[in-house]
Image (cartoon, helix red, strand yellow):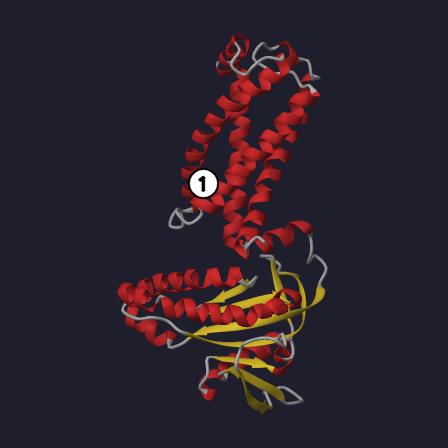
Amino acid sequence: MLSPKTKRNISRILPFGFIWVFMDLFFLVNTLSLTGGTENQAQEAAISYTAPVLIFASLAVFIVGILVGTIEIVLLEKRFSNYSFLGKIFTKFLIYSSVLFGIILITYPIAAGIELNRSPFHPDVLYKLGQFLGSFVFLNTALQLSFELVVSLIYAAISENLGHNVIKNFFIGRYHTPKVETRIFMFLDMKNSTTIAEELGHVRYFDFLRKYYDTLSEAIIRHHGEVYQYVGDEIVLTWELEKGTHQNNWLACYCDMKNTMNALKNDFQADFGISPDFRAGVHVGEVTTGEIGALKKEIVFTGDVLNTAARLQSLGKEYQTDLIFSEELHQTLNARHSYSIQHLGPLMLRGKSSETGLFTLN
C-alpha cells in the first residue's frame, strides 16, 4: 500500500510527463507540417522518423518529464521558497539544463542505434552524435527542450502557489458548473495569536506562521485532508465525505497534528521563545462548490456547514476544550474506534432552528 504522501507526490509528478510528451508531439507535428517530413531525412545529423524511433522518443520524453517532476517535487520544491518567481525559474532552469544535456548524450546514441541497427557505441553512431552536437538540429532540440522545461517549471510554480487539487480541478473543469457535495470542514485557530504576534513582531511572526503551517502539513497529507484556506493564523481544512470518514481520517488528523505540535514544542521554543497550540471546530454537511470571481477565479464552498464549523471552533474556549465536533460527525465515527468521546450536551447555535449536539475528546 502506498502512503498518502506518496500517492500525492505521484499525482503531482505525472502531469510533468504528460506536459513533456504533449509539447514534444506539438513540436514534431509542427516540424513535419513545415518540412513535409523531408528536411530531417536529408540532414546527416537528424534521426529518421520511423515508428520504433517515435515510440522510443515518446517514452524517453515522458521519462524525462517524470524525472524533472520528481526532482522538482521531491528535492527542490522547498529549497527555493525564498526566491522570487522569476529567480526560482531561472535558477532551476540552469540546474535542469545541465541534467538534460547529460540525458541527450545518453538518449541520442540509443535512438541513433535503433535507426541504424547498430550498438549505441558503434563508430557510425558516435560519428552521428558528433555531427548532431555541431548541427542546427541540436540547437533546435535544445530550444525545444528549454521551452518544455520552462513550461513545466511555470506549471510547478503555479501548482505550488495555488495547490495541486485546485489546478487539477480547473484543468478538468470539475467545478465549472456548481456542484452539491457533502464535505467535512475543520476550522483550526491558533491560541493567543494576537499576544504572540505582539511579542514577536510582524516579521518574526511571519516566520513563526510559516513554520507552524509547515509543521501541520505532514499530518494533513497523511490523513487525506485538503487546505481550503489560510486566513491569518487560521487554517480551514476539508475532506470529501468518504475520505474524511474512512478510518476516521478527520479525527485522526486532529490527533496527529496535536501530537506533532507537542513533539516540536522545544523546537519552537528554541527558535522563537514560544510554542503554538490550536483549537478546532468540525462539522459535516452539504455545500455548493464552484468557480467564482470576476477579476480572479477561485474554487469556493458555500453553505451553512462552514458557519457551523466556525462557531463550534469559537466555543472551545467557553467549554475549555481544544476540539468540538457536531453530532452529525459523531454518527460517522467507526463503531470500533478507540477514541474516548465526551458528550458536551445540546446547544442552540445562533441562527439555527434546532439544537446541535456537541462532542469532544476526553
**Residue 179 rendering spot, x and y as whole percentages:** 72, 64
Callout 1 crowding tier (Cα within 10 Å): few <14, some 14–19, many ≥20:
many
**Residue 22 rendering spot, x and y as whole percentages:** 64, 35
| Above or below 333: residue 350 | below
| Above or below 14: residue 243 | below
* Quadrant housing residue 346: bottom right
Mark 1: which amino acid?
Ile
Q: Residue at x 55, y 28 (%)?
A: 144
| Above or below 194: residue 36 | above
Q: Is 100 left, or right, of 249 in this rendering?
A: left
Q: Quadrant of the N terminus?
A: bottom right
**Residue 299 rendering spot, x and y as whole percentages:** 62, 60
Q: Residue at x 30, y 67 (%)?
A: 266
Q: Residue at x 59, y 49 (%)?
A: 11
**Residue 132 rendering spot, x and y as whole percentages:** 52, 15
Q: How many marks?
A: 1
The residue indicated by pointer 1 is 89
Q: Is 318 left, or right, of 338 in this rendering?
A: left
In front of the other: 101 or 249? 249
In front of the other: 131 or 195? 131
Q: Residue at x 49, y 27 (%)?
A: 103
Determine the secondary structure under disc 1: helix
